[in-house]
Image (cartoon, rainbow, N blue to C red):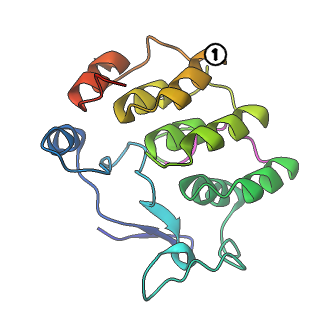
Amino acid sequence: ATGNVGSSIVVQGSINLSEQREGRAAGRSAPSVGAGEVPAEGAMRPASFRRGPSGGGDHADAYANLSPEQQLRAAVSISDMAHIEKLVADGVDLNQPQGQNGCVALDACAWSGSSTAAALTRTLLRLGADPKVAMQAVVGAAAWGNVEVLTALIAAGGRVEQALNDTSALQWSVEMNQEES
């Protein structure tokens, strides 16, 4: 499914959480989550950030038609730390719930599965993101088996009892084959 928010955000295909768990268990990678949940890395990004023939990743004016809150979501989805720092300096609140799902920047970061998630998590925490207000960050980090993100969130006060769809972070970790992490 593709939809537009403002004029530049592109939402690419998504699946529901039970399909996500089954897909990851079956060996498929990079799960995305369904409506009302945090998008996977790249599931929501400005059109000019898309890779491939139609999008070369030019950041020059990618945020031009987006509200500051939309810019934050887009910047988190692609780990644009410099733009996130600019937004925070301009007064954007990292702890303000965004969109339909009400998730904050740390939630989107933890669910991204990005190789830069640990660095982005540390940046968000340094800039004032509060893991106590995150709804799914601990669960997302556990589901992806991202020990660095999980450790940073818990050390900063993230809730270890966090659950999503009545499934604890530990259960998510096991269901997503992250027992070794």
Q: Position of residue 173 (x, y in %)?
A: 31, 25
Residue at the (16%, 44%) spot, across then down: 19
Q: Nearer the viewer, residue 154 or 95?
A: 154
Examine the rendering and report whether any part of residue 128 can be seen.
no
Judging by the rendered image, the residue that carries numbered circle 1 is 155
The outermost residue toward the bottom is 53
Q: Is residue 55 above or below residue 84?
A: below
How many numbered markers are drawn? 1
In the picture, which quadrant includes the C terminus? top left
Residue at the (77%, 47%) spot, across then down: 92
- 144 vs 91, left or right, is left
Residue at the (57%, 71%) spot, across then down: 6
Magenta segment includes 93: yes
Examine the rendering and report whether any part of residue 84 can be seen.
yes
Q: Is residue 61 above or below residue 77?
A: below
Q: Nearer the viewer, residue 9 or 42?
A: 42
Could you tell me the amino acid type at mark 1? Ala
Q: Nearer the viewer, residue 148 or 141?
A: 148
Which type of secondary structure does the marked residue at label 1 adopt? helix
The outermost residue toward the top is 161
| Main secondary-structure element of the magenta-colored stretch | loop
Q: Position of residue 105 (x, y in %)?
A: 60, 41
Q: Is residue 32 above or below residue 93?
A: below
Magenta segment includes 56: no
The outermost residue toward the right is 89
- 36 vs 122, left or right, is left
Q: Position of residue 130 (x, y in %)?
A: 68, 26
Residue at the (16%, 38%) spot, across then down: 25
What is the crowding at mark 1: few (fewer than 14 residues within 10 Å), some, or many (at least 20)? few
Bounds of the magenta segment:
92-99
